[in-house]
Image (tube, rainbow, N blue to C red):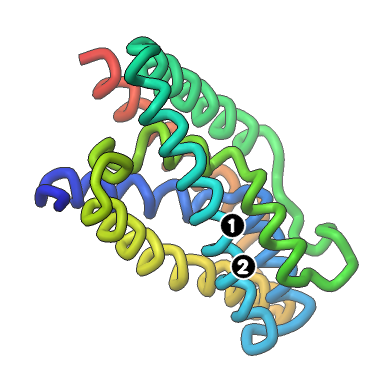
Amino acid sequence: MLTTSSAALFVLGTSVVLIMPGPTNTLLAAAGLKQGVRRAAKLTAAELAGYLVSISVWGHFLAHAANSLTWLPTLVRTLCCLYIAYLALRMWRTAVAFSSAPQATVGLRTLFVATLLNPKAILFAGTIFPATAFAAWSAYLQAMAIFAALLIPIGLAWIMFGAALGGGKLKWARPERVQRCASVVLATFCVSLAWTLFH
C-alpha cells in the first residue's frame, strides 16, 4: 500500500505530466477539434491502455534491472529530469497549433500507438510511480487505479479544449500563451525533481 505522502507526491507528479502538451494530448485536442467531445471521448480508453502497457513494461524492467545495476534508477531519474528540462525549453520556443495537427481522423489504434511510444511513460515508470508499485501487486493496483482516475478527466479536458477551439469559444487561448504557461509549470516540476534527486 502507498503511504499518504507518497500517494500525494504521486498524484501531483502524475497530474503535472499528464496535463503537459505532448503527442498524445495533441492528438486528443485534434480529435476534439474534428470529431467533437462525444465521438472523441472513447479515445481516453486507448490512451489509458497505451500507458498501462508501457508503464508496466518499463516499470518492471527497471525494478528488476536495479537489482544488478544499482546505478540505473539514478541514471533514469537524471535522464528524465533532463528530458523535462528539454521539454520545458522546447515548449517555450515553439507553439503547438492544434489546427495544423494531422488532418486524418484520430482513431483508437493511432492514439494507442502514440501513447505506447510516448516518452512520458518512461518518466512515469522511472521517476513518478513509487518504487513499491513494481514490487507488490497491491501497491501496483492502487497506483494504477489512481493513475486511471487522473488520466480520464485530464484526457477529456484536452478533448474539450480542442472542441472549444474548433467552436471559437476560446479566442483568448492563443497557442503560444498556453504553451508558455505549460513551459513554466514543467520547468518548476523539473526543479523540484532535481532537488529530490540530489538531496
Circle 2 packing at 10 Å, graded few (<14), some (14-19), many (20+), is: many
User: Which element carries disc 2, helix, strand or loop?
Assistant: helix
Front in this rendered view, residue 192 or 92: 192
Image quadrant where residue 40 sits: bottom right
Kindly identify the residue that appears in the image at 63 percent across and 84 percent down. Answer: 37
As drawn, 166 above or below 128: below
Please state which amino acid type lies under the numbered disc 1: Gly
Kindly identify the residue that appears in the image at 42 percent across and 38 percent down. Answer: 59
In the rendered image, which quarter contains the C terminus? Answer: top left
Circle 1 packing at 10 Å, graded few (<14), some (14-19), many (20+), is: many
Give the x, y percent position of residue 31: 73, 72
Residue 126 horizontal side relative to residue 182, left or right: left
How far is the residue under mark 2 from the one under mark 1? Answer: 6 Å
Determine the residue located farthest toward the bottom in the rendered image: 38
Question: Which residue was labeled with disc 2?
Answer: 46
Front in this rendered view, residue 170 or 97: 97
Kindly identify the residue that appears in the image at 79 percent across and 77 percent down. Answer: 34
Give the x, y percent position of residue 53: 54, 53
As drawn, 159 above or below 181: below
Residue 80 horizontal side relative to residue 9, left or right: right
Give the x, y percent position of residue 120: 53, 42
Question: Which residue was labeled with disc 1?
Answer: 50
Determine the residue located farthest toward the right in the rendered image: 103
User: Which element carries disc 1, helix, strand or loop?
Assistant: helix
Proximity of marks 2 and 1: CB atoms separated by less than 8 Å:
yes
Front in this rendered view, residue 45 or 38: 45
Residue 108 horizontal side relative to residue 198, left or right: right
Please state which amino acid type lies under the numbered disc 2: Ala
Image quadrant where residue 100 sits: bottom right
